[in-house]
Amino acid sequence: MLIIATNGAASGKAGGFVASHGRAGAQFRAQVINRQPRSASQQQARALTGSLAPAWRALTKAQRQGWSQLASSVLRTDALGQAQPLSGYALFVSCSRNLLTIGGGLPATAPPTPPAFPAIAAFSAAALYTAPPPDNFLAGFALAWAPATLSPFAGVIRASAALSPTRGNVRPSDLRIVAALNPLPLSGVNLLATWITAWGAQPPNGTVTFSLNLVDPASGFASPAVRATAPFSAAQYNAYIPGTILIQINETPVAVLSDQVIEFNENPQAGG
């Protein structure tokens, strides 16, 4: 059940309900306790964030105050759509994570100067295939951006799983890193293997959402993300290799069938 309030923004939990903010305004939903996700990428992200706490504690008091002062001018949009400043620790962790993601080191102990990012005029994504139907196996996704030269910035590309085309709200938490490009190639890049590594073997069809952030290799600051979607519909490889089936009656072999694949409703289920 979803209740839309008309008396302003709200946030938090109370009495089994969760308050949040959506396109229609303040919303109240029944609280659902989510399972603890433990994908490889999520565990790596948590381990990375946890490893940065000692680096923050190693800063002097004056250095931490400098990061806090810089963070007071860096605004991020919260779940209610309101711009809020970061804490010094949150900004330090954000910059550090970005630098480590693109293969750099930790930021300087002194707070850096925020860079001026160029505008990304266009960002697109399209599915690539090996051949026309019916042998249209998915060969990858072509991502392109303009302008072609965005140096000296690196780029971090995130992607969703293959979702239904009717899924309109893809949250940042639905995206996983599939490429960290330092330096950022000219114009675009093609990828598939890293997307499969992040999300598993692709289904026959779906829509994938990609996002691109620019990252400053000197400071670790990242630009706002731009997004693109790529629908695809592809044939599937037969993962089952034909094998041999031994037929027995009362444990006595009576027949051997070679080059066989077991199917149910024309779907392969087992092979050799």
Image (cartoon, rainbow, N blue to C red):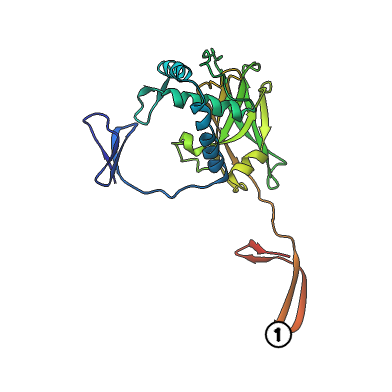
Q: Is there any visible trace of residue 174 in the rendered image?
A: yes
The image shows residue 159 at horizontal and vertical percentages of 56, 36
Q: Residue furthest left?
A: 7
Residue at 66 percent of width and 24 percent of height: 182
- Pointer 1 residue: 251
Residue at 67 percent of width and 28 percent of height: 189
Q: Is there any visible trace of residue 233 in the rendered image?
A: no
The image shows residue 98 at horizontal and vertical percentages of 56, 27
Q: Nearer the viewer, residue 33 or 50?
A: 50
Q: Nearer the viewer, residue 100 or 119?
A: 100
229 sits to left or right of 180: left
Q: Is residue 188 above or below residue 150?
A: below
Residue at 50 percent of width and 40 percent of height: 165
The quarter of the displayed image where residue 133 is located? top right
The image shows residue 244 at horizontal and vertical percentages of 76, 70
Q: Nearer the viewer, residue 132 or 10?
A: 10
Query: Residue type at mark 1?
Result: Glu
Q: Is residue 10 above or below residue 147?
A: below
The image shows residue 131 at horizontal and vertical percentages of 72, 41
Badge 1 marks a residue whose secondary structure is loop
- Label 1: few (<14), some or many (≥20) within 10 Å? few
Residue at 54 percent of width and 19 percent of height: 109
